[in-house]
């Protein structure tokens, strides 16, 4: 296997994926013998479907690619298919003519939850009727590659590094010289003659969102605030609640800033526990704000502190000073480093990079090694505060 093959697939699933890809290539590959790959003529592309059926963080990382695609095809119809987790964001973006929500039942099976297969089939039939020239997925995995084929688009582009490359007409080979996720996503536009690396992430925050965020927060606290997002997709990627509470108290004591806790409705209890333990230094708004208002709160914060999560990418896209807390994830790939962004990460673990779903060394959990003093000092550096 090449270093880029199945690079984000957990080892326990790789063998099964190898078998699926081998069988798929044997079946679908025969078609390629009689239908050789066509050269892409951008002038013939008039209807485009973008698959954005992933989480909030990946959708934010992809915004530069979607902007570049719209700039290259200003007169084309560009539709998007989003997931329930990214739908609100995708609908806020100005790049798409229409957005269809698609709750992929394959993902629900993977999460041991029931999926609505009838709704999925109906959505796919509707997409096939639109006769897309191009289906693009900037991330790529087996379910999405299969979905691209199901749409009937004559050109299907994605990375095959999480399986399903046999479903694509133009699988994009990974350039291992690219290490950050934004550059990796941009590779998928190369077959269209687009260099998306020049486009940074962006988030549209309206004046109404900014005003609503300021109004809600001003009712709870006086003065400037730090934005803290204590949640993450998995518990293994989450800093302990008591340390977030201690950090909020430290920011209040050291800089005079109160902390606003932001997150999803599922993180409401977590936010309440942290606020209660902060002795008045933090207020939880987890689950209370619309996503646009959350962006408005982050945009006006003195600093953002969070785990490896979607809201951390949002803070960077909004050009807010940020401190990112990394454990079992990949900070070089999904983190952000510059004069206004720092990553806290202890890589002294023989298992790194390990699963983001479970820690192999629970008695020496890497997130436990990130200390409050280090986080407060990082806040001082990225903000220039004394």
Image (tube, helix red, strand yellow):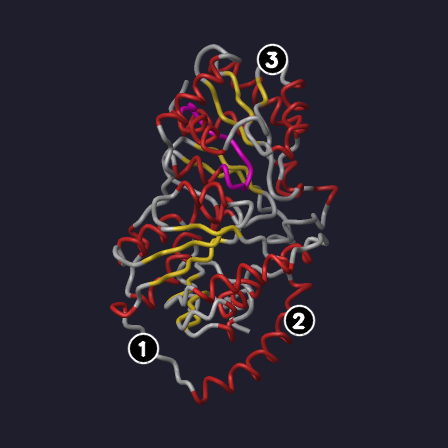
Distance from disc 1 to disc 3, alpha carbons, whole Å, reads 62 Å
Q: Is residue 60 magenta?
A: no
Along the polypeptide, which appears first: circle 2 or circle 3?
Answer: 2
Q: Nearer the viewer, residue 155 or 170?
A: 155
Query: Which one is in front, 137 or 127?
Result: 127
Left or right: where 21 falls relative to 80? right
**Mark 2 Cα-neighbour bin, 10 Å: few <14, some 14–19, many ≥20:** few
Question: Which residue in the protein does label 1 denote?
Answer: 39
Residue on which the image places disc 2:
15
Q: Secondary structure at mark 2?
A: helix
Mark 2 or 1: in front is: 1
Which stretch is magenta? Answer: 300-311
**The quarter of the displayed image where residue 8 is located:** bottom right
Residue 296, label in figure: none
For the point 62% across and 42% down, which residue is it? 237
Q: Residue at x 47, y 10 (%)?
A: 222
Q: x, y (%) of residue 93?
A: 38, 43
Describe the element under mark 1 as helix, strand or loop. loop
- The residue indicated by pointer 3 is 280
Give the CA distance from mark 2 to mark 3. Answer: 51 Å
Question: Mark 2 to mark 1: distance in Å?
Answer: 33 Å
Image quarter (top left, top right, bottom left or bottom right) of the C terminus:
top left
Task: Answer with mark 1 or mark 3, whichever residue precedes in sequence.
Answer: 1
Residue 262 appears left or right of 368: left
| Percent x, y of residue 102 | 54, 54
* Closer mark to the observer between disc 1 and disc 3: 1
Please, is residue 382 above or below residue 199 in the view?
A: above
Of 380 and 192, nearer the camera is 192
CB within 8 Å, label 1 to label 3: no
């Amino acid at each position: 296997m090449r270093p880029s093959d199945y690079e984000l697939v957990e080892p326990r699933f790789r063998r099964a994926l190898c078998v699926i890809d081998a069988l798929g290539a044997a079946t679908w590959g025969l078609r390629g013998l009689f239908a050789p790959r066509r050269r892409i003529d951008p002038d013939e592309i008039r209807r485009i479907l973008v698959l954005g059926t992933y989480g909030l963080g990946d959708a934010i990382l992809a915004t530069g690619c979607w902007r570049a695609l719209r700039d290259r095809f200003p007169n084309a119809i560009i539709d998007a298919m989003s997931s329930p987790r990214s739908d609100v964001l995708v609908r806020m973006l100005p790049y798409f003519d229409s957005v269809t929500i698609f709750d992929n039942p394959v993902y629900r099976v993977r999460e041991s939850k029931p999926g609505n297969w009838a709704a999925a089939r109906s959505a796919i039939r509707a997409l096939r009727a639109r006769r897309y020239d191009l289906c693009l997925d900037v991330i790529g995995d087996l379910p999405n590659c299969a979905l691209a084929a199901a749409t009937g688009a004559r050109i299907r582009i994605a990375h095959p590094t999480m399986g399903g490359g046999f479903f694509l007409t133009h699988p994009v080979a990974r350039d291992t010289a690219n290490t950050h996720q934004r550059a990796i996503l941009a590779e998928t536009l190369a077959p269209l003659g687009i260099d998306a690396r020049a486009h940074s992430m962006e988030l549209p925050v309206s004046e109404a969102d900014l005003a609503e965020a300021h109004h809600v927060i001003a009712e709870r606290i006086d003065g400037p605030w730090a934005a803290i997002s204590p949640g993450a997709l998995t518990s293994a990627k989450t800093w302990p609640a008591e340390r977030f509470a201690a950090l909020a108290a430290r920011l209040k004591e050291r800089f005079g800033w109160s902390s606003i806790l932001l997150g999803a409705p599922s993180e409401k209890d977590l936010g309440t526990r942290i606020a209660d333990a902060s002795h008045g230094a933090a207020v939880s708004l987890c689950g209370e704000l619309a996503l646009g208002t959350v962006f408005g709160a982050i945009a006006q914060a003195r600093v953002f502190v969070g785990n490896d999560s979607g809201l951390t990418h949002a803070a960077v896209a909004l050009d807010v000073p940020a401190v990112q807390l990394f454990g079992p994830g990949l900070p070089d790939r999904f983190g952000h480093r510059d004069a206004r962004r720092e990553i806290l990460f202890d890589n002294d673990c023989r298992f790194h990079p390990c699963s983001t779903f479970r820690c192999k060394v629970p008695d020496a959990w890497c997130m436990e090694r990130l200390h409050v003093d280090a986080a407060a000092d990082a806040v001082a550096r990225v903000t220039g505060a004394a």
